[in-house]
Image (tube, rainbow, N blue to C red):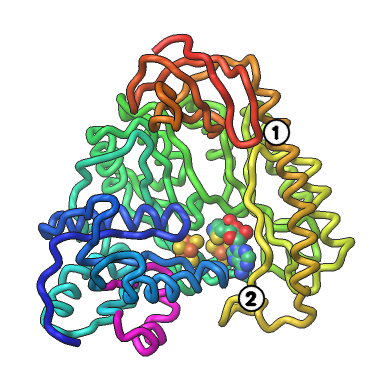
Amino acid sequence: MKQTAAPKTYRVKSFGCQMNVYDGERMGEMLQQEGIAEAAEGEDADLVVLNTCHIREKAAEKVYSDIGRLTKGKTQKKAPMIAVAGCVAQAEGEEIMARSPAVSMVVGPQAYHRLPAMIDNAVSGKRSTDTDMPADAKFSALPQRRKSAPSAFLTIQEGCDKFCTYCVVPYTRGAEISRPYAALVDEAKMLVEAGAKEITLLGQNVSAWTGEDDRGRSLGMAGLIRAIAAIPDLARIRYTTSHPADMDDALIETHGEISKLMPYLHLPVQSGNNRILKAMNRSHTAESYLKLLQRFRAVRPDLALSGDFIVGFPGETDAEFEDTLAIVDEVRYSQAYSFKYSPRPGTPAATMDDQVPLEVMDERLQRLQASLRRDQQAFNDASIGKTCEVLVERKGKREGQWLGKSPWLQSVHFTGDVAIGDLVTAELIQAGQQSLGGRLISP
Ligand code: SAH
Ligand code: SF4
Ligand code: F3S
């Protein structure tokens, strides 16, 4: 590579889950600390960080098409310095370096605190790759939080030891680690001082978080939620994503006792069929999952439920897919994510027999999504007439319109004299499938 000028502006493009978005924000903060400013919208950036996702084939392919567009001048007038970060970087670092000479650096999700040094390398004409996984090192190397949207993300746990047979996360994010209690309470306080009213605690297996409080007593998620709920100006707490195996009694009780903990739970089941769940290496059955939900609903009857589903896992028969529709009918999710199975290199399921044809997956996905849309509409319809708090997050498309979130994570639009970050009271008066209309009652 040729020597080049040090970048003055950057853009981070995040493609993945919320933790990937959190990482993208932290990389931005770090670049700003290095004196590199965020490029204004519509303007060329000197450095583009592609913060990639490897979860499904389509997500992983995006990085190559993006590199192509950036180098051919399709996204910017001038080709920028390119950094590939995130889970594709972790999984295919060497391949990217070999395939894309325009890429100056490849940095895995646990190593991005080393970006500044890698940028220096690039300036002097050297390409670099760093996909080490030093547990927790990046967090302590990152700058303090100074700016926050009303709703902020806080990664408390990373990695996964569950090894579902379809999934790349245990390989791209490494083993489960929990960030220390004190660092999390500090970061939460800083986010609140910086303007956050709501914090969403993040982890690939967020409920697997464990730690010790100031007095050395061991704590789980429930204890951490209670500590964060004690921050006076914080109004709302959420967490995502949980695995059914990590939901303990203390966490369930917290949903009944801590009013700042919002009545919403994202708890992926993946399939409603026990043979498929076993082949996926999920540790729950359809029955144990439903029982668990009952316990949550017993302490918090208005709990909104969300989940993830995979259709067309290898060997899934029509009858086994029907079991997924049946569990959806039973749970009545307020919203959910559903995907066609995507074989991922290096995972056990990718080489299983009886891969399901694409047409069959397409048809199953359509049927599943029709059920999920029906339930989302029904959940929203049932909200009409409720009065609730809405956290104002941004301006709406129309003049005078605002958008915010209800406690059940529904998008609510309304008009009135409010500001971003306000927690207002609104009556829900109209329901679509994706959002609700509200009438402002009091600021
Ligand atoms: N840790 C979380 C979510 C991880 S990834 C959990 O266990 O629930 C988010 C979702 O992507 C998964 O819940 C799953 O539904 C989906 N997913 C993961 N690997 C996939 C694959 N190979 N093909 C299709 N969907 C997949
Ligand atoms: Fe992937 Fe399963 Fe781990 Fe979730 S629990 S990240 S689906 S391996
Ligand atoms: Fe994607 Fe990595 Fe998240 S693969 S879903 S960005 S953990």
Mark 2 or mark 1: which is in front? 1
Image quarter hosting the N terminus:
bottom left
Image quarter hosting the C terminus:
top left
Furthest-bottom residue in this view: 98
Type of the residue with mark 1: Gln
Query: Does the beta carbon at disc 2 come under 8 Å from ligand 1?
Result: yes
- Where is residue 250 drawn, in percent x and y? 54, 39
State the SS at label 1. helix
Measured in 3D between alpha carbons, the distance from the residue under mark 2 to the one under mark 1, in whole angstroms, is 32 Å
| Residue 174 in view, yes or no | no
Quarter where residue 198 is shown? top left
User: In the rendered image, which residue does mark 2 sit on?
Assistant: 343
Query: For residue 377, which numbered disc appears in the image?
Result: 1
Type of the residue with mark 2: Pro
Q: Is residue 60 magenta?
A: no
Question: Compared with residue 440, is residue 294 higher up or lower down, i.e. above or below?
Answer: below
Query: Does the beta carbon at disc 1 come under 8 Å from ligand 1?
Result: no
**Residue shown at the point (42%, 67%) measured from the top left:** 52
Q: Is residue 90 magenta?
A: yes
Question: Compared with residue 443, is residue 215 higher up or lower down, i.e. above or below?
Answer: below
- Residue span colored magenta: 82-102
**Residue shown at the point (34%, 27%) measured from the top left:** 421
Quarter where residue 271 is shown? bottom right
